[in-house]
Image (cartoon, rainbow, N blue to C red):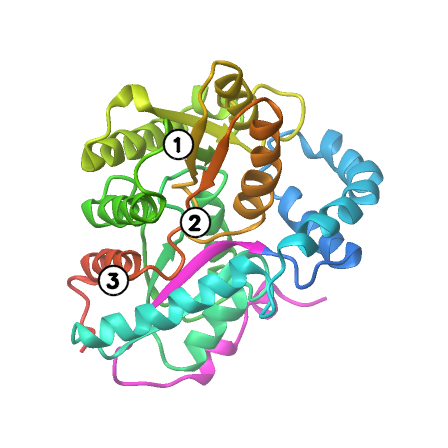
């Protein structure tokens, strides 16, 4: 029988370096490797099997997950992913990779040249553990973990922290770590959002009747137990409206992607859009400020399904505002946030 020590990874003991090196690890939610049912089954098993995501007792949830959901949902989800798949791959992976490359350049231009920049996915590939191991092998001994979730939630940011510490638990030589919990009210992030809206308005000839800001939902129970996510989403929306000089009555915060029968954060996005159309709101600008890169939830759920629902209910024009993606203002904001959190570490 192996001893407890045998379960500890020996990888870190193979690296020797006398020069401290820093890295920024961007972390996004994740994506299947390809738009197929088998790939979706692997991805959903990992995603929905995370107790941070589904807080139902394992003994009750896992039989449902493996006995029902993973037998029916992968094929449906694969069809949706296929409808938004890019030539280079999954949109989320494409935008995250581009953000990583651009951030590396932005930091270099700012004079922070010895900092490496890599990205990982909480679910799917490249995994957090594989990227941390790669950085460790390259001699990195200080890592800033920067989740691409502007608003903190136990279902997202805390899950990233869990996975990082799961990897750390197997290491003999641990790197120094810092985490960015949230930047929902960071001035540079708000300005980047505002610029994306203004650029959209410039192309469209002005604002629509209503600006709808759709954030990913979480169970209402999570908020009652102390999750700050809802407050942070509403703070982002309030600051963005103020930055735009947009009247509060012309803005609407909603929450999307409800899963299961439990109550989630309200109001729900699609029903709200239907109600707006029925009330005579002819045009809507719709954006998803909580997503830093376009993905299934923005391109298919919002720009396809929600668009159809609004138009079918009598709406005249549905105008989707893309996520920040590789917008220069966003990469500048990301660089600013990273530099602030790297402050005090020797990075040159």
Q: Residue at x 72, y 33 (%)?
A: 61
Q: Tell me the SS state at disc 3.
A: helix
Q: In the drawing, what numbered circle is on residue 229?
A: 1
Left or right: where 125 falls relative to 336? right
Picture coordinates of residue 204, whole percent (x, y): 36, 44
Magenta residues span 1-30
Residue placed at 49% from the left, 69% from the top? 131
In the rendered image, the vertical position of residue 1 relative to residue 58, given as above or below: below
SS for dot 2:
loop
Tag 2: Cα neighbours inside 10 Å, few (<14), some, or many (≥20)?
many
Pick the residue in front: 287 or 138: 287
Q: Which residue is mark 3?
A: 335
List the residue tagged with mark 2: 322
- Label 1: element kind: helix
Q: Is residue 303 left or right of residue 32?
A: left
Residue drawn at 25 percent across, 62 percent down: 335
Q: Is residue 4 magenta?
A: yes
Earlier residue among tags 3 and 1 = 1
Out of 145 and 197, give the one closest to the viewer: 197
Q: Is residue 23 in view from this perspective?
A: no
Residue 215 location, x and y as percent? 45, 35
Q: Is residue 324 above or below residue 108?
A: above
- Residue 298: percent from the left, percent from the top? 52, 44
Q: Is residue 256 above or below residue 180?
A: above
The answer to the question of whether label 2 and label 1 lie on touching residues, with beta carbons closer than 8 A, is no
Q: Quadrant of the N terminus?
A: bottom right
Q: Nearer the viewer, mark 2 or mark 3?
A: 2
């Amino acid at each position: 029988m192996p001893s407890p020590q045998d379960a500890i990874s020996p990888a870190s003991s193979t690296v020797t370096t006398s020069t401290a090196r820093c890295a920024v690890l961007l972390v996004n939610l994740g994506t299947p490797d390809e738009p197929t049912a088998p790939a979706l089954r692997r991805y959903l098993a990992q995603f929905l099997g995370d107790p941070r995501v589904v807080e139902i007792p394992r003994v009750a949830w896992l039989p449902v997950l493996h006995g029902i959901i993973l037998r029916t949902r992968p094929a449906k989800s694969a069809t949706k992913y296929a409808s938004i798949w890019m030539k280079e791959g999954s949109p989320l992976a494409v935008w995250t990779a581009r953000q990583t490359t651009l951030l590396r350049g932005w930091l270099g231009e700012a004079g922070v040249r010895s900092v490496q920049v890599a990205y990982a996915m909480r679910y799917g590939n490249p995994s957090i553990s594989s990227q941390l191991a790669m950085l460790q092998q390259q001699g990195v001994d200080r890592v800033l973990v920067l989740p691409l979730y502007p608003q903190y939630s136990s279902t997202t940011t805390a899950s990233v922290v869990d996975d990082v510490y799961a990897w750390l638990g197997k290491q003999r030589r641990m790197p120094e770590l810092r985490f960015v919990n949230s930047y929902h009210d960071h001035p540079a992030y708000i300005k980047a959002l505002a610029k994306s809206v203004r650029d959209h308005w410039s192309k469209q000839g002005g604002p629509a009747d209503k600006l709808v800001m759709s954030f990913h939902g979480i169970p209402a129970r999570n908020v009652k137990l102390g999750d700050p996510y809802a407050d942070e989403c509403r703070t982002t929306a309030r600051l963005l409206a103020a930055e735009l000089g947009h009247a509060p009555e012309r803005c609407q915060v909603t929450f999307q992607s409800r899963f299961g029968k439990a109550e989630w954060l309200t109001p729900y996005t699609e029903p709200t859009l239907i109600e707006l159309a029925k009330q005579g709101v002819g045009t809507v600008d719709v954006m998803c400020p909580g997503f830093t890169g376009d993905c299934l939830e923005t391109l298919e759920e919002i720009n396809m399904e929600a668009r159809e629902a609004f138009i079918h209910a009598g709406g005249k024009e549905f105008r989707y505002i893309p996520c920040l993606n590789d917008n220069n203002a966003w990469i500048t904001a990301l660089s600013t946030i990273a530099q602030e959190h790297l402050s005090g570490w020797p990075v040159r």
